[in-house]
Image (cartoon, grey):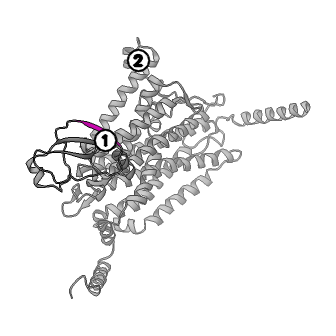
Amino acid sequence: MNAEAEAENELRRRQLDTEERAEQIVPGSEIDSDDDPPLQATEPRPRHSLKGAEQETTFLHTVLSPLPKRWRNWVIRGIFTWLMIGLFCLIIYVGPLALMFTTLLVQVWCFKEIINIGYSVYRMHGLSWFRSLSWWFLITSNYFFYGESLVADYFSVIFSKSDIMRWLIAYHRFTSFTMYIVGFVWFVLSLKKRYYMRQFSLFAWTHVALLIVVTQSYLIIINIFHGMIWFIVPVSMIVINDVMAYMFGFFFGKTPLIQLSPKKTWEGFIGGGISTVVLGMVLSYVMCQYPFFVCPVEYSESEDNFNYTCDPSPIFRPQEYSLPETLANLSALSVVSHRGRVTQKERKSPKRKYSGPPVYDQLQVRPIIAVERTKATVEENTAWDGEMPLYSLLGWKKTITMYPFVLHSVALSLFSSVIGPFGGFFASGFKRAFKIKDFGDVIPGHGGMMDRFDCQYLMATFVNVYIMTFILETSPQKLLQKVYMLKPEQQLQLYNMLQDSLIARGILQP
């Protein structure tokens, strides 16, 4: 058995030596990258090309140098957290177009960070046109997603006025497919002998990056069109969960949560989750009161601008909910028995339900089953005995008034606090696989852009699925957008057919 094990280990060593020799590149050989400068054959394969967020600015490093490293990172992280929150509020103030443009910028930057990791891992193989092909597929994916769904569904009134844009929308899918085929043929022609496996690995790398980044950013923008509240509240929940989990973990964390992220603790996970639910409900309640946040983003042809006023959806209107029977029964478990005096006004309304406590001579609490009792007919200034539920004594009600969206926000907050962190765990495992600390160092104290948005992309998918499953209703405005894309004779035909149908059903008079 020992001889067989030694033979197997020797075979593995030989295979590793063969792979290392294959990674050596002869300058000027045919496998040099077409869009990269020639590399030296003696240059070692980079394993830690991304240094992460530890590259602090010289100014902050100098000012905070007296502090221990733990507190220095805490201060730097806090400063840039508040800066990002302030920038986020400013973008919200500008409007939905600014949010969409920011989403696209973040998408491109995250894609760049993911592709750079792949390039740093495989650059010594001199793979042809790797980065150029990756960016071409990014452009193709964005054109496919945004060209049809967003332009045709939400901006058709604007683009239908141009014959060229009308043609591009009509043949959008064919154009998108042609662009992808160009990239596909380009990739096949760039294949080099001895490096097929690595080139196909990078081909898959690019497509997975597109799936993670482009698809999720597209869903984020779709959520914005349903109302900015569907973007702001979920994003804020992820931020709240991240900040509060960090705070609870920093001050109280002792129990490790998961091996992929050794600094994550159960104390931070639980504290962040509770804070997300509570603060998420408060934020939702406040935002439901402003049409700017709850109205769908729609273009008004009459105003030639986006319309931020609307008749709010029922989920953004206050509604009265009856308390569950369990709570009502709990409230009815305690009733106050009392003796007192009845006023002249109460004597004239003997069957009037009790609305407030009199001056009590004595109080005695005992359980009963009835929830409400009426007063018997009594004479003025005579003593009487009665029973009153404790919730009436305390001014409680059987119903509660709130915005339905606040209840929906509980589902969003639970997902963001329980499932959302797994997006970060996934990113941590990815970084550990390639022995890097962060995706980049664009944000001191936080790392790269992808380090901040790893959970946001997962949240965006859930919010979109939630809207499509439980919220979305057919909108006449969206149907009208489709009608605008028809030819004039088709629009007239549709009008006549609709008119005939309404007359036949008696809705319109002939």
The residue segment tinted magenta is 362-366
Q: Position of residue 168 (x, y in %)?
A: 39, 65
Give the residue at mark 1.
282
Most distant residue in the top direction: 66
Q: Is residue 492 left or right of residue 141?
A: left
Q: Nearer the viewer, residue 275 or 99?
A: 275
Looking at numbered disc 2 in the image, what kind of residue is underneath it? His
- At horizontal 61% and vertical 35% (from top left) the residue drawn is 433
- At horizontal 36% and vertical 50% (from top left) the residue drawn is 369
Q: Position of residue 290 (x, y in %)?
A: 23, 49
- Residue 100 appears anywhere in the view: no
Crowding at dot 2, Cα within 10 Å, few <14 / some 14-19 / many 20+, comes out as some
- Residue 206 appears anywhere in the view: yes
Q: Position of residue 499 (x, y in %)?
A: 27, 83
Q: Which image quarter: residue 146?
A: bottom left
Crowding at dot 1, Cα within 10 Å, few <14 / some 14-19 / many 20+, comes out as few
Most distant residue in the left direction: 344
Up-down relation of residue 396 to residue 374 (above or below): above
Res 61 label? 2
Mark 1 near mark 2, Cβ–Cβ under 8 Å?
Answer: no
Residue 363 belongs to magenta span: yes
Q: Nearer the viewer, residue 56 or 402?
A: 402
- At horizontal 43% and vertical 49% (from top left) the residue drawn is 460
